[in-house]
Every structure is written in structure tokens, then in C-alpha cells.
Amino acid sequence: AQMEKAGGVPREELLKLDRRPKIVKQITNLIQRKPKEARIIEPVPINKEDSTIGRDALLADIRQNLDKGLSTLLTGEIGMGKTHLLKLIAKEKGCLYLDSPTPIRQFLQKICEKYCPDWNKRLPQKNRSGVKEITELLTGVFAGCARKETLIIDNLDKLRLSDVGPILSLADYFVILAAADETKERLKQVWWKFKKIELPPLDSESEKALIKQLTAGMVIEDYNLLETHIISLAGGVPLAIVEMANQLSGHPKIKDTDVRELYHESGVRYRDWSSLLFVVWGAAMVFRFLALGVHSFENYILAGFSMAVIATATRILRSFGRR
Ligand SMILES: Nc1ncnc2c1ncn2[C@@H]1O[C@H](COP(=O)(O)OP(=O)(O)OP(=O)(O)O)[C@@H](O)[C@H]1O
Ligand SMILES: [Mg+2]
């Protein structure tokens, strides 16, 4: 009917294309039905990595700090999205993104290449010049500048204690946006230079939005099950959501069993082991009582010993799970 409307093809011509048996055609003519509506499939974002969800307020704080010339440190657990935000700001400002401050020489060279391309010529000992000379050259270049450039340093907690000096000098001439998993005590001097912003887990609305974005285009049996299951395992960590979506992306059609099989490392590894160990521990305890009943001293000691070993193993696994 739509073709008829749009293209002006005569109805008789269209009816010729209908190859169904006559009786079926007559019955369908008797019952007038609305044409089935096509299901709208949402467009899949071209690059899923590019969009950022649920961090608007945080990004506003970061931008505000940088505009005021305040060096800022993003802290947050592994996978909370620090690198994601650093790269976003780097792109926005067109400034240098450095993935690690170690090895310090390569790190400094990358900065030189951007801000002082003839750095090699300007150093007295050329390639053999030390970290100190390179740092001095850089600070010299910027000493006269009124406006500070922005520098983005990821994984700043990887900094070696011996390399603190160069970073502190850079902090005087650049506005630095950095990220760290943890602010270790040994680098206290460095952390003092920064205003800290902690990345919280995503709220559940953002988790939902991220799941929706990552599963766009997938064929899913029960979307609600998938959503609640991922949220219950992810704990607001974007990396967990991304990983679980990747686990699903291999299936042509995502069934409920696929969803139930989903796991996320941080949660499940310990849980599976501990329940098994608990059962074995219970068995050892039963065995111990039996040994007591039949007055078998050796077995009584053996069972007691096994229980101690299992309890220790559970402890160790638990501490791994928490890491
Ligand atoms: N707000 C967000 N919106 C959409 N995707 C996000 C968001 N935050 C993080 N991601 C995605 O989650 C994944 C993990 O994020 P990212 O690598 O930035 O974490 P991280 O905090 O740097 O982790 P690590 O401590 O291991 O360096 C990436 O694929 C990233 O694109
Ligand atoms: Mg990172």
C-alpha cells in the first residue's frame, strides 16, 4: 500500500506480484489490517569509545580548574574511567597526552618534541644529555611565557621516587592534568601540587545508558535481564560494563543463558572458590566428628589439620579477591 501511495504504481500491477493462493488473498481482503510497523533500530555509534556518559559535572570541574591554572589529579579505582576523561580533555584542548611518566627520559623527550623541536641541537651533549639538562632546557623555554600550557599525564603513580624532581619542576611551568589509581605516601611531595578529584562509580542511570550504548545493534532475548544482571555485577565501574558487553558481543543472538553466564573478574573469582572451599571444610568437620566417634586419633588430627589448611586458603583467596 505504501508503494502504491509513494510511487503511483497501479494497484493491478502490484496485485500480480502477490503469489499467495487465491483463497488466502480473498480472506485477507475481507479482514482489513494495518500494515505492520517496522521496528526502529537505534543507530550504532561509529566509535563507542568516543562518547562519555555520566561525567558532565566532573568534566565541568576539571575544565574550571584548568582554566584557573590549577593542576588537577584524577583518582579512582582501576577502570573507573580516568584515562577516558584525560584523553577527552587532551582532544578538546589539543594538548599533549602522555601515558606514563616512566621512563622519565622518553617522557621528557616527548614534551620537548612538541614544544622545542630543535631540542637535540640545543643540548650540549646531544643524545647523551641527562634528565636534568633536558628538564632545564624545557623550563628555560617556558620561563618567559605568561600563559601556562596544559600537560596531561596518565598513570602518575608509576613515577619513580628518583624522578620526582623533574615532575616538580614541570609543575611550575605547566598546568598538569594527571591521573592515578592510588596516591601512595612515597610520592606525597608530588600530590601536594595537585587539586584532587575523585571519580565515583557511575550512578545507575548512567550505567543503564552505557549498557544501552554498548549493546546497540545486538539481538537480545531479554534486555531487562541483561541490564539488571550487568548492573549487579559491575558496581558502577565502566570498565566492568565494557568487558561484559564485549563478552556478549560474540553471540549472534544473546540468550538468557548467555546473560547468566556473564561474569566480572573482580566479583566472581573469589565467590566461586570460597563456596567450594566451604563445602570441603564442612566435610572435614563431619569427618572429624566421625573420627572422634570411632576413637581414631590419627584421623581426628588429620581432619583438624585439613580444616586449618582450608581456612587459611580461604583467607588467602579472599585477600586476592579484594585486590
Ligand atoms: N564515562 C564513560 N562513558 C563511557 N565509557 C567510559 C566512561 N568511563 C570509562 N569508559 C570506558 O571504560 C573503559 C575503562 O576506562 P579507563 O581505561 O579510562 O579506566 P581507567 O580509570 O583509566 O583504568 P586504569 O586504572 O586501569 O587505567 C574504557 O573502555 C572507557 O572507554
Ligand atoms: Mg587508565
Image (cartoon, grey):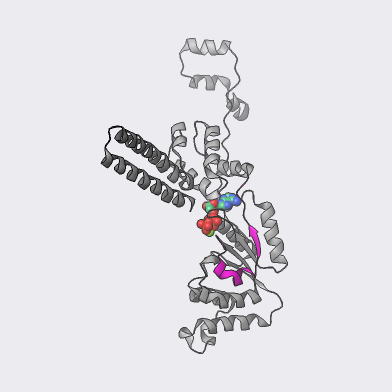
Q: Nearer the viewer, residue 201 or 211?
A: 201
Q: Position of residue 236 (x, y in %)?
A: 58, 46
Q: Nearer the viewer, residue 10 or 312?
A: 312
Q: Is residue 46 visible?
A: no
Q: How many marks?
A: 0
Question: Residue at (69%, 53%) from the top-left corner?
Answer: 57
Q: Quadrant of residue 11?
A: top right
Up the image or down, 1 lies above or below 43; here it is above
Tell me: 286 left or right of 75. left
Q: Residue furthest front?
A: 295
Q: Is residue 278 visible?
A: yes
Q: Position of residue 145 (x, y in %)?
A: 69, 79
Tell me: 275 left or right of 208. left
**Magenta-tinted stretch:** 181-202
Q: Quadrant of residue 253?
A: top left
Question: Residue at (52%, 87%) from the top-left corner?
Answer: 123
- Residue 184, magenta (yes or no): yes
